[in-house]
Image (cartoon, rainbow, N blue to C red):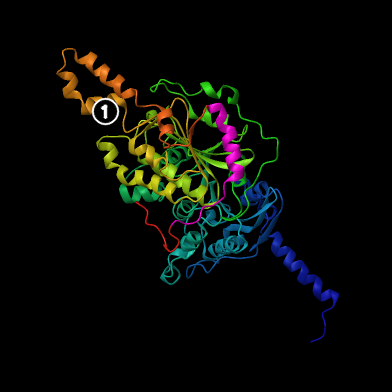
Amino acid sequence: MPPRSGDDVNPLVERVRAAYAAVTDEARADKVAKQHARGKMTARERVAQLANGGFYEFGALAGPGPAQAGAAPLVAPGDGVVTGIAYVDGRPLALAAFDFTVLGGSNGATGMAKLDRCVERALLDKIPLVMLMDGGGHRMQEALDSRLAAPGSRLLMRLADLSGYVPIVAAMMGPGFGAPANLAACCDFVTIVRGIGTIGMSSAPLVQAATGESLSNDEIGGADVQAERGVVDVVTDDEHEAIDAIRLYLSYLPPWADGEPVLAAAPHLPGDGAADIDDLVPAALRAGYDVRTVIDALADRDTLFEVKRTHAPNVVTAFARIGGRPVGVVANQPLHLAGALDSAACEKAAHFVAVCDAFGVPLLILIDLPGFLVGTAAEESGLVRRSARLGYELANATVPRFVIVTRKAYGAAYIVMGGGRSIDADLSLAWPTAEICAIPIDSAVDVAFRADYENAPDPAERRAELIKLFQANIDPLLAADGFGIDDVVLPSRTRPLLLEALTRVQPRRPARVPAKRRTISPI
C-alpha cells in the first residue's frame, strides 16, 4: 500500500478532532444551559474544579451499547460519564464524573466499563477513587434485556477490593437513587449538596408505585435527612463546598494504605483555647461542655474536620492534626445524652476507627461518658452487638492509639472506648477531673445498698454517708497508683505528650495472631 499523503492524513486528523469536539460542553450548549438552570455545574466543570493540577481523560469517545430493538440509536457522548486521572493538590486520583446532561446520567454498560477502568487504575496505581454522582441509576434502554442483565455486575466486588486499600469517595450532586446509592454506600466518605443532591434506594415515583406513599425525592433521600441517618458524612450548601470537602478529606489520608502520611508544613500552632485548656472540662460531673473545644485546644490551629456531625451527635468523629501529623479523634460529647453510647454512636465511631486504621491515621480517644444508653429502645436497636462493634474495631486497629479519660468513665463503656489497658493503648492518660469506676457512685449505692440506708434512722443521711465512703476510692491518682493508666496529667501537659508520642511510636503494630485469615464482625 502506498504511503498516505498529507492530503490523506489531514481529513483523518480533523475527523478525530471533530469527535472530541462533539463531547465537549461547547458542542451541547442547550444541554449545558438546562444543567445550569437546575443550579448545577456540568460534569466537565466539576472535573475542572476538582482537578487543580490537571486531568488526563480516557474514554471520551466511548459510546452507548445498543438500544432496544426497534428504538432509535442512542446518542450519549462518553456514555454519560467523564473518566480519567485527576491531579488534586499535586496528587493523582482516579475520577469518574457522571453527566446528567446525557440521558439523565443513567448508567449504561459502556459507562460502567469506564467506571470499572477507574477502579482498576486506583487498584494498580495505588491512588484514591473519587466519584461525582449526578445520575438516574440503570439506563432503561439497556436494562430491559435479560441477555444484558443476567451477568449482573462485578463492580461492587471490585469496590470491595479497593476498600481499605485506597480512599474511596463519592459526592452526591444530583439524583442518586438506585445504583449510585449502592456505589456511594461502598465509599469511605460521602458528601452531598443540599437542595440538589439525593441518595436512596428508590426515587419518589417508584416508592409511590410500590407502597402508595406520596413523598418528594428530598423527603426520601435529601441531604439533611440522610445526614441525620448517618448515610452521608458531610452536607454542603453548594458544589464548590462539596469539592472543597473532598479535597480536605483526602488531605488527611495517604494515597493508599501503606503510603506515607501527608504532613502539614510548619509552624504548627496550638489551637484556640489551648491557653485555657486546664479549665475547659468542668469538675461537676453533670455539667455540660462542648468537647470540640477540648479537641481544638489539643490539635493544631484550624485543623479540625468533623464527619457525620448531625448523626449520633453524642460522639464526635473528626480528623485533625497535631504537630502537622494527621490524627483521627473519637470523643464522647457531653452536650448530647451526656455522652452516653447508643447504637448509632457505636456504629459511627466504629466505622471511623476502621477508616483511620485502614490508612494509618493514629487515633486520639477522649472519654467522658456515663455508660451505655439503657432501656427497651436501646435493646431493640441491637446495642449489645453494636457496642461490641466499637470495641472490636479498636481491638483490631494496628495504628497508634492514645486514650485520655477527661471526666466520667464507667463500666463496660469505658472498656469499649479503649480505656486503661483494654486495647494496649500507646498512651493511656487521665486528667484530674477523671472518675473511673464500674458505675456512678450514687447509682451503685441505690442498687447495692438500698436496704442499708432505707432501714437507717435517717435514710438520706445514711445514703450520703455511703456515697462519701465509696467516693474516697474513686480518684484518678488511685488509678495511676495501680498502674491501670500511665499517668494523671494536667490538660495543658497533654499536647506535648501527644507530640512526643507521635514522633516516637511505630506507625503499625504487628498482627497479634498472624495466621488468622480474618475476624468476624459482631454485626
- Local crowd size for mark 1, using a 10 Å CA cut-off: few (<14), some (14–19), many (≥20): some
| Residue 228 versus residue 491 in the image, above or below | below
Please indicate, yes or no, whether residue 37 appears anywhere in the rendered image: no
* Residue 389: x %, y % from top left: 38, 47
Q: Amino acid at mark 1?
A: Ala
| Residue 19 versus residue 368 in the image, above or below | below
| Residue 466 versus residue 71 in the image, above or below | above
* Residue 308: x %, y % from top left: 48, 39
Q: Residue 473 or 156: which is nearer the viewer?
A: 473
Q: Is residue 516 left or right of residue 438?
A: right
Name the residue carrying label 1.
Answer: 444
| Magenta span dominant secondary structure | helix
Q: Residue at x 25, y 25 (%)?
A: 445
Please indicate, yes or no, whether residue 380 appears anywhere in the rendered image: yes
Q: Residue furthest left?
A: 455
Indicate the quadrant containing the N terminus: top left, top right, bottom left or bottom right: bottom right
Magenta span contains residue 240: no
Q: Residue 112 or 183: which is nearer the viewer?
A: 183
Q: Residue 477 or 177: which is nearer the viewer?
A: 477
Q: Residue furthest bottom?
A: 1
Q: Is residue 44 left or right of residue 460?
A: right
Q: Which residues are magenta?
A: 491-512
Q: Residue 366 or 32: which is nearer the viewer?
A: 366
* Residue 49: x %, y % from top left: 66, 46
Q: Residue furthest front?
A: 481
Magenta span contains residue 501: yes
Q: Residue at x 65, y 44 (%)?
A: 263
Disc 1 is placed on an element classified as helix
* Residue 108: x %, y % from top left: 52, 62
